[in-house]
Amino acid sequence: MADHGFWNYAQRDPDALALIDPSGRKFTRGELLAECNKVVGGLRTLGLEHGDVVAINSPNCAEYYMLSLACTQAGFYLTPINWHLATDEVAYIVKDCGAKAFVGHERVGEICVKAANQIGFPKNACFAIGGIDGFRPFSDLTDGQSAAMPENRAAGTIMNYTSGTTGNPKGVKRPLAPAEVDPDLIFSMMTIFLGMFGIQAEEDNVHICGSPLYHTAVLIWSSTSLHFGHPVVLMDKWDAEEMLRLIEEHRCTTSHMVPTQFHRMLALPEAVRAKYDCSSTRNMVHAAAPCPPDVKRRMIEWWGPSIYEYYAATEGGGTLVTPEEWLEYPGTVGRPWTNAEIRIFDDDDREMPQGEQGTIYMLLGETAKFEYKDDAAKTKKNRLATDDGKTFFTVGDVGYLNEAGYLFLCDRKIDMIISGGANIYPAEIENVLLSHPKVGDVAVFGIPNEDWGEEIKAVIEPAEGVIAGDALTEEILAFCKEKLAKFKTPKSVDYTNEMPRDPNGKLYKRKLRDPYWEGQERAI
């Protein structure tokens, strides 16, 4: 079992390719191993001990993996920070996670400096990827340190912070494995997850990472690919055509993606898509948001049966579905994977029968146990104990199980629209709108209505070259009336030049919805 793990692969075959960074620079396994080992030495010289935390605020770069591979073999926590956050938000996370070292990238250097000053972070523990005034160069962590395997190795882990859609974000903190447990064993076990999707060790697999590494799944999937002996092609900023080019150039076989990326690749002109050979793709896995059935079907037609999906959360999970299963049950996010369990409960904690909607709860297994750092109330709030002695947790999604045990998502509970007493799920309406060729992106939500409580608003980002206006609105609403029941058809449409999405495709719907609710309270 412990034969896997990046550190083992790098020692067995140091000349094999490990990483191609966004600049095109290539790192062999041996080169990347040497750098991560040096980082361990640098952090220990700084005084870090087992269980201490390193925070990083950076776009995608090779140093991200150096830190991750260092922390996870030295018994440290690594806390990635969304590098699009403002100064106060960065300062909050660095302080709240208890970081003993803070690494920032020069592209967000000004924010890193202000955040460190705001919380009085020790200057000698601030390091810069590139140049940041007052920060020590990243090379200070590696210069003079040994490239040999460090002593007293212990498994560390990642402590991600939730998105903070209500209040401050919270760290999802899992206990570390006992210090005497070999990190090679822990991270060899993690590769089992990739195996559940049919992915095998080495076998000329190449993983392409086009999403930000501060996202939980993105860092886990790409790091686990390294631990399975797969080279990683790392993109800086995701671009539809550039991803197609890299897939062809490096014969990429696996990736972790989101539905927005599929939609934007499909929106490329047919002549552009036809330029690139994507026949190497085998396991292009997606998650994070429901995928419109039409989008997924078109991706399978284009790339073949290589589009896999799973449903999980930072806190744990989950389900998975193969392309073949999805074609049999279009729209499903799959059945529970090994040792997982899904149950549906109503607001009174009564379990719902198959086919009936409710809040989705996932089994809290031994390996998925977590707590929200310093927030016992939030940890307790999302838990549910059942009569058979099990504990489940939820992230607030609504869905149902069909007769074959496949899970279907409806929407997030907080996004549900209640109009005239009817529950309306925006995701269903968004899927219809995204099938219109003049819609580039869309968000649907409820706004105040004096008689009905809420009415349906659609905010649309027109497809490239499409002009927003009354004529487009009439066309889109007429399209909806053919596809949706009257009570699900948007009452009005607004337009935006760009949806408030982060680079991984997550939509910040509150930024669009909240202005309509100023001075009023929603029912949910």
Image (spheres, rainbow, N blue to C red):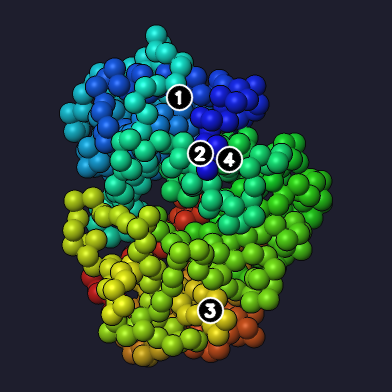
Viewer-side label of 2, 4: 2
User: What's the distance in space between the residues labelled 2 and 1, CA to CA?
Assistant: 19 Å
Three-letter residue code for mark 3: Gly
Neighbor class of circle 2 (other Cα within 10 Å; few <14, some 14-19, many 20+) is few
Residue under numbered circle 4: 228
What secondary structure is marked by label 1?
helix
Rendered image quadrant of residue 249: top right
Asked whether the beta carbons under mark 2 and mark 4 sit within 8 Å of each other, the answer is: no
User: What's the distance in space between the residues labelled 3 and 4, CA to CA?
Assistant: 31 Å
Between 203 and 239, the residue placed more toward the observer is: 203
Mark 2 / mark 1, whichever is N-terminal = 2
* Residue 2 place in picture, x, y as percent: 50, 39
Mark 2 / mark 4, whichever is N-terminal = 2
* Residue 364 place in picture, x, y as percent: 35, 64
Residue under numbered circle 3: 405
Q: Residue at x 29, y 73 (%)?
A: 389
Residue under numbered circle 1: 36
Neighbor class of circle 3 (other Cα within 10 Å; few <14, some 14-19, many 20+) is some
Mark 3 / mark 1, whichever is N-terminal = 1
Judge whether 77 appears above or below 432 on screen: above
* Residue 149 place in picture, x, y as percent: 44, 21
User: What's the distance in space between the residues labelled 3 and 1, CA to CA?
Assistant: 44 Å
Three-letter residue code for mark 2: Ala
Between 126 and 4, the residue placed more toward the observer is: 4
Three-letter residue code for mark 4: Phe
What secondary structure is marked by label 2?
loop
User: What's the distance in space between the residues labelled 2 and 4, CA to CA?
Assistant: 11 Å
Mark 3 / mark 2, whichever is N-terminal = 2
Residue under numbered circle 2: 2
| Residue 305 located left or right of residue 440 | right
